[in-house]
Image (cartoon, rainbow, N blue to C red):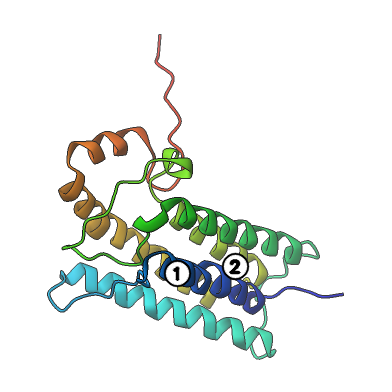
Amino acid sequence: MFRANALTLYLVFLVFAVGGRIALHYLATGDHGIRTVKPSASRIAKSASFLLVTSFIATIALSILDAIGTVQPQVQIGGSANTTGASISLAGIALMVVSQYQMGVSWRFGVDQDEKTDLVMRGLYSLARNPIYSGVFLFYIGLLVLLPHILMLLFITMTCLSIEMQVRFVEEPHLRDLHGAAYEKYAEQTGRYFPRFPRKSGR
């Protein structure tokens, strides 16, 4: 019986959430949507980018080593780990793909401070401000279930840290400068990665 592994899920991620998104965006706009870090960018923006690229390469390399049998899981979760891990990762990929689609022509990978885009608040973005990153988190949780290894945990932690740095110190300040009060109101009504449920008022 076919058993999914971390590398299989990574290939699905690269085809649909990365390559597919870039291709569709280019067909729609004539622009690939990738924004690299400029030399004039802040130190934290450069650090976040470096950390993200490094952890991305590291998790792929570890997934390859797992596929060829060089690296073995350090924790035996049980027979359901394969199905559970694959399901979580696929759900994360699906969330990324839908979120990217709903962002439409405003989608970008990275930030160009001189570029203006619309503030997207429809669909999944009416529930959370960064559903693409929410999908990334789910994807990596699934990989960790498929390959429970201390190095995978370390590299995923690096990825999550880089995303948090990018969101808090690069993307959110840019959106505040660009959209002002509209973004502030939007941020008050939605969670950063997950829906914000209203608190019950005490009596």
Residue at the outermost left position? 40
Q: CA distance from mark 2 to mark 1?
A: 34 Å
| Amino acid bearing label 2 | Leu
Extreme top residue here? 203
Name the kind of residue labelled 1 in the image: Leu
Query: Residue 116 vs residue 199: left or right?
Result: left
Indicate the quadrant containing the N terminus: top left, top right, bottom left or bottom right.
bottom right
Under circle 2, the secondary element is helix
x and y percentages locating residue 175 in the rendered image: 23, 50
**Left or right of residue 11: residue 58:** left
On residue 144, which mark appears? 2
**Residue 33, quarter of the rendered image:** bottom left
Disc nearer the start of the sequence (2/1): 1
- Residue 130 vertical position relative to residue 182 in the rendered view, above or below: below
Q: Which residue is mark 1?
A: 27
Secondary structure at badge 1 equals: helix
- The numbered dot on residue 136 is none
Disc 2 crowd, CA 10 A, few/some/many (<14, 14-19, 20+): many
**Residue pictured at 48% horizontal, 55% vertical:** 101
Above or below for 145 versus 104: below
Q: Who is closer to the viewer here, 122 or 93?
A: 122
Where does the image place residue 16, in percent across and percent down from the top left? 57, 69
Give 98 or 199, whichever is nearer the viewer.
98
